[in-house]
Image: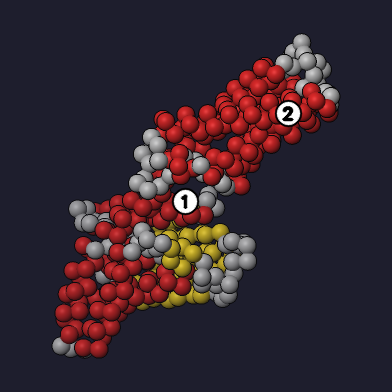
């Protein structure tokens, strides 16, 4: 993973979860040493408790120091900075071990019985070096994977952003041109709707949207398509309140699904039809369903052959939305679609955060 300019490449140990990882690995090493066959003094509960306290103290100290030193170390090349971070951990462990050994000998606590100073200091430094090297490498790989996921999600959004332009813009402009002389007010409203739609598309990868904004955007899109298709396109909204209107969603979550219903369903049927859009709360999830008449899959394949935004584009849109929702909300977020007896049903489920019904 190449570090982004201006962004620290060293893993962030200021997070509670990552500090817990360091503490957990340190305690695991103590348990392994205690369980390993050895000719040294027998491990008692008191000895295990003191060793655990020492290991956890060292792990916490190293985490805090590396948290503070993250940006200075990240100014170095990864190989040099990583080596420096590991050496810092070794110095902290060696210093801590020397202090503990001196205090134990001076007060005769017997915390490190029969262990010479050089062995205790050297062993502590070596173990700390291994632990920090392994944990930093693991977290570095995790950060790289998460960066790739974010980049992939952004690329998917950019693909949607580009996809909305060609096949929709020309039809909309032709429709507006036909309305200018016949109904200037409707043409003006259509221009404003088109402007809002493309403003959302241009900002698709920047920040979050909300359920209210996504519904409004879908309504604007549908109002433009109704001007083009006329009575062939009917819309029926069902909103089962209360709904989490401020629920954060990735931009362009709902509009592409509605667009699929128009392009691959209504517009391909001579008589048109009605798109039913339902929003409800089910089992602590936001459930959105889009139900519309559509030709059979084989006919859609033939009709869309060579046309941008054909059935392949429809599947791409659903996969992209599912990918971005999974990144934002985990495996509980789902996007599904199926055709049955002349109708296509697209469903979207997003888990609600605690208290997320507002």
Q: Nearer the viewer, residue 86 or 334?
A: 86
Q: Badge 2, how many Cα within 10 Å: few under 14, some, many 20+? A: some
Instruction: Give the x, y percent position of residue 64.
Output: 59, 42
- Specify which label sits upstream in the sequence, 1 or 2: 2
Q: What element carries label 2?
A: helix
Q: How is the image coloured?
A: secondary structure
Q: Is residue 158 above or below residue 197?
A: above
Q: Is mark 1 on a helix, strand or loop?
A: helix
**Does 338 sit left or right of 51 as displayed?**
left
Instruction: Give the x, y percent position of residue 31.
Output: 72, 26
- What is the residue that sits farthest to the front in this orientation? 106
Please say whether residue 32 is visible from this viewpoint: yes
Q: Nearer the viewer, residue 151 or 282?
A: 151
The residue beneath circle 1 is 327
Q: Is residue 108 above or below residue 292?
A: above
The residue beneath circle 2 is 100
Q: Nearer the viewer, residue 167 or 32?
A: 32
The structure residue drawn at horizontal position 63% and vertical position 20%, both measured from the top left corner, is 122
- What is the residue that sits farthest to the top in this orientation? 39
Q: Badge 1, how many Cα within 10 Å: few under 14, some, many 20+? A: some
Residue 130 picture quarter: top right
């Amino acid at each position: 993973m190449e570090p982004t300019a201006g962004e620290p490449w060293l893993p962030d140990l200021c997070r509670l979860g990552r500090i817990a990882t360091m503490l957990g690995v340190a305690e695991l090493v103590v348990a392994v040493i205690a369980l390993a066959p050895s000719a040294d003094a027998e491990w008692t509960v008191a000895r295990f408790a003191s060793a655990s306290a020492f290991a956890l103290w060292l792990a916490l100290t190293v985490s805090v120091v590396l948290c503070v030193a993250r940006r200075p170390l990240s100014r170095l090349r990864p190989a040099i900075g990583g080596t420096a971070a590991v050496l810092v951990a070794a110095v902290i462990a060696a210093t801590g071990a020397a202090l503990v050994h001196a205090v134990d000998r001076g007060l005769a606590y017997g915390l490190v019985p029969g262990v010479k100073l050089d062995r205790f200091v050297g062993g502590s430094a070596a173990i700390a070096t291994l632990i920090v090297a392994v944990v930093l490498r693991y977290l570095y790989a995790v950060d790289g994977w998460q960066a790739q996921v974010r980049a992939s999600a952004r690329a998917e959004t950019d693909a949607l952003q580009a996809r909305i332009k060609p096949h929709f813009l020309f039809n909309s402009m032709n429709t507006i041109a036909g309305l200018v002389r016949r109904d200037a007010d409707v043409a003006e409203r259509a221009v404003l709707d088109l402007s809002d739609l493309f403003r959302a598309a241009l900002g698709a990868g920047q920040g979050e949207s909300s359920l209210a904004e996504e519904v409004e955007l879908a309504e604007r899109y549908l109002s433009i398509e109704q001007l083009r298709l006329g009575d062939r396109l009917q819309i029926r909204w069902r909103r089962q309140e209360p709904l989490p209107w401020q629920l954060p969603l990735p931009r362009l979550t709902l509009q592409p699904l509605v667009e699929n219903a128009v392009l691959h369903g209504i517009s391909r049927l001579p008589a048109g039809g009605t798109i039913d859009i339902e929003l409800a709360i089910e089992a602590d999830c936001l459930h959105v369903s889009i139900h519309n008449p559509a030709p059979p899959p084989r006919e859609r394949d033939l009709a869309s052959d060579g046309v941008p935004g054909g059935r392949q584009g429809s599947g791409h849109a659903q996969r992209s939305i599912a990918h971005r929702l999974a990144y934002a909300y985990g495996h509980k977020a789902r996007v599904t679609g199926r055709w049955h007896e002349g109708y296509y049903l697209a469903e979207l489920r997003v888990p609600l955060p605690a208290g997320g019904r507002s």
